[in-house]
């Protein structure tokens, strides 16, 4: 599986961006997906994740600092995961990475970056004040 992230850029505080990450390879619907970010001098941190579907429903998960501002979604037809980011602030400045891991079920989900097998190349998000 190869992941290709896009959508980063330079924006002002309060603006919005939508990141996209498209996967090549089969069985995208069996993966749980996540976005992580890494700011200069800091460790990579979890931002948002989404489970594989149970029936028609995939379950999102967010770190506290982005709840109510960011929305993660997946399109299993387009093999793409999105991160809609609203009300951006300078603390959101980082390189954003998408990641995927095979999941046996929607319950098989984790925030741990070490558990993700596949990573995109990263896309820079810079928010000016």
Image: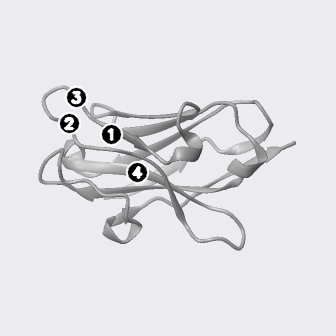
The residue drawn where x is 24% and y is 50% is 31
Q: Residues within 10 Å of mark 3 (few under 14, many from 20)?
A: few
The residue drawn where x is 18% and y is 47% is 30
Q: Can you say which quadrant of the picture contains the N terminus?
A: bottom left
Mark with earlier residue (4, 3) = 4
| Image coords of residue 127 (percent x, y) | 78, 45
Residue under pointer 3: 57
**Marks 4 and 1: in contact by CB < 8 Å?**
no
Viewer-side residue, 5 vs 45: 45
Cα distance in 3D space between marks 1 and 4: 14 Å
Label 1 or label 4, whichever lies nearer to me, is 4
Give the farthest residue toward the top. Answer: 56
Cα distance in 3D space between marks 2 and 1: 13 Å
Residue under pointer 2: 53
The residue drawn where x is 29% and y is 36% is 59
Residue under pointer 4: 34
In the rendering, which numbered label is found on residue 92? none
Q: Residues within 10 Å of mark 1 (few under 14, many from 20)?
A: some
Cα distance in 3D space between marks 4 and 2: 14 Å
| Image coords of residue 77 (percent x, y) | 28, 31
Mark with earlier residue (4, 2) = 4
**Marks 3 and 2: in contact by CB < 8 Å?**
yes
Q: Residues within 10 Å of mark 2 (few under 14, many from 20)?
A: some
Cα distance in 3D space between marks 3 and 1: 16 Å
Viewer-side residue, 45 vs 2: 45
Q: Residues within 10 Å of mark 4 (few under 14, many from 20)?
A: many
Mark with earlier residue (1, 4) = 4
Residue under pointer 1: 79
């Amino acid at each position: 599986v190869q992941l290709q992230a896009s959508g980063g850029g330079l924006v002002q505080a309060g603006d919005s961006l939508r990141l996209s990450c498209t996967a090549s390879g089969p069985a995208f619907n069996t993966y749980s997906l996540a976005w992580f970010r890494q700011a200069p001098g800091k460790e990579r941190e979890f931002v948002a994740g989404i489970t594989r579907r149970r029936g028609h429903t995939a379950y999102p998960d967010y770190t506290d600092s982005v709840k109510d501002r960011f929305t993660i979604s997946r399109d299993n037809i387009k093999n793409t995961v999105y991160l809609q980011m609203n009300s951006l602030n300078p603390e959101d400045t980082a390189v954003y990475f998408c990641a995927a891991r095979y999941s046996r079920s929607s319950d098989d989900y984790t925030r741990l970056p070490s558990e993700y097998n596949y990573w995109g190349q990263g896309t820079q998000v810079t928010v000016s004040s």
